[in-house]
Amino acid sequence: MTKEAKREGLGLGARKNVVRAKQMKDYAEVGRKLVWQRQIIFAAALGLAGYYYSIALALMTGALIILSEIYDFTVFKRILVWDGRDAAVARRLLNQLYVGTVLSASVIVFYSIAIALAQGPGTHFMSLFFLFAAALFAAMNNHHILPILVVRIGMYGATFLFIPIYDIWVTGATIQSELWAHLFTSLFVLYFVIDCSRIYLSFYQRSLEQMEALTVENNKAQQGYEAKSEFISTMSHELRTPLTSIKGSIDLTHAGHLGPISEKAEQVMGIAKRNCTRLIELIDEILDLQKIEAGRMPFNMKRFDLRDLVEQSVAANAPFAARLGVRLTCEAEADHLPVVGDSARIEQVLTNIVSNAAKFSPEGSQVRVRLTVEEGRARVSVIDVGPGLADHDRERVFDKFSQVDSSDTRKIGGTGLGMNISKQIMQAHNGSIDYRKNEGAGTTFYFDLDLADDDEEGKPARLDPSAEAAEADDLVTKCVAAS
């Protein structure tokens, strides 16, 4: 046997084990859920038997039912706590289900035959109807495992035919007797029960096949996503090193450290410098996104003063805004606002918001960064007087690779990753980020953080993988488009 065939055989065997475990757990779960429904049916049947026929028969049947139910409940519990992996355990539990099936079906058969014998030759409505109900109940709720369904329907069906045949035998009834009509009617009813079992079994098997197909497709998508993520991460790391070297060389040349250059060459170097910076920023954001989606982005949670961080960030971003003809100002209501978080990541969020506000603000305008306390939380607001955002833009603003102005002629560059990364950073800090349209021109972006208690200290943390990590987006194509 080739290695490929062995791997295929192992794959088929593993899938069979998964399906078998699923069937057993479904069977046990249904059996556990219907326990009280069964007890009500049994109680009604035993009450009728005790009142109209024999109290001793009712008590004896009740004792057998209790023993059978205890056994079934014990097996169901073992199956539901089983991890579904060990094939030997699966076989042992399946054999226990077979034993429980024979026991519980035998109790019903015993009850039906005992009532029929007590009634004597006749219609046996009570016995046959109880058998019919039990068979229909099995068809509806025991179709998960075919051998168990066959055993139950086989035992009930044999009893269904035995009662009228026994009446014919003990009475010596001829074909003209009504007892033969009872037998033929039993055959029709038995056919109906078998057909119902077939339909329910078909529905369940179809759902299992669909579930297996979805599982296979999900595994393929997950493998594709992991391969894509690994490729993007490797590509980003490999690109960043030469780009950093290229940018360093361009910076030196543009600054004249390698000798004088012409005015036209200086312009070309300036363009190259800006585009190198843009590409490095794109790569850094992609690497951040990959860490977030993989749950590998570390956060060094420490106590710090949010006011100090905001003032430092405004000062650091002021030159960038000035090049765009925009002035940054800082307003703070409190002198000291302690929070716990990763100060570098919080500054990254604020820098992203401030830079966006400066980009979209008209020349000569002002962007205000305001620090307030709202409902017991620290709030940092960035207020601009740009074109503004509507409420229906919210999903696009915080989506990956999304630009509100996504046209080819847009004046403001960017990857569309910054706000998505900022949102996930704030979620990791148990914070929030959002925006609202100003009453006049512009938009106010803001993020909230919990104020730190007097004795609260930080600790390292990691961001949990995002629910969006399962999406198999074509990041490579979008990166090229964004750049």
Image (cartoon, rainbow, N blue to C red):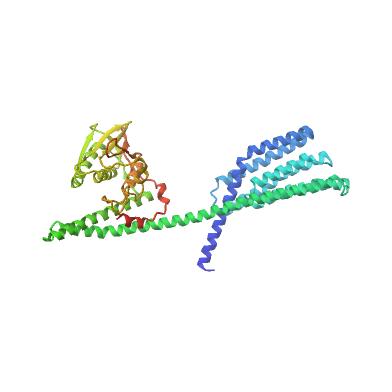
In the rendered structure, the answer to whether residue 10 lies left or right of residue 166 reads: left
In the rendered structure, the answer to whether residue 427 lies left or right of residue 312 reads: right
How many discs mark residues in the rendered view?
Answer: 0
Image coords of residue 362 (percent x, y): 22, 44
Q: In this picture, is 189 found above or below 45?
A: below
Residue at figure coordinates x 68%, y 40% from the top left: 67
Quarter of the picture containing the C terminus is bottom left
Residue at figure coordinates x 76%, y 49% from the top left: 188
In the rendered structure, the answer to whether residue 408 lies left or right of residue 82 reads: left
Quarter location, residue 390 = top left
Quarter location, residue 115 = top right
Quarter location, residue 63 = top right
In terms of depth relative to the viewer, which is nearer, 461 or 312? Answer: 312
Image coords of residue 127 (percent x, y): 77, 41
Quarter of the picture containing the N terminus is bottom right
Image coords of residue 480 (percent x, y): 32, 57
Q: In this picture, is 290 found above or below 362?
A: below
Q: In this picture, is 2 found above or below 61?
A: below
Image coords of residue 477 (percent x, y): 35, 57
In terms of depth relative to the viewer, which is nearer, 128 or 28? Answer: 128
Name, please, the residue furthest toward the left.
260
Q: Is residue 100 visible?
A: no
Name, please, the residue furthest toward the bottom.
1
In terms of depth relative to the viewer, which is nearer, 257 or 69? Answer: 257
In the rendered structure, the answer to whether residue 84 lies left or right of residue 68 reads: left
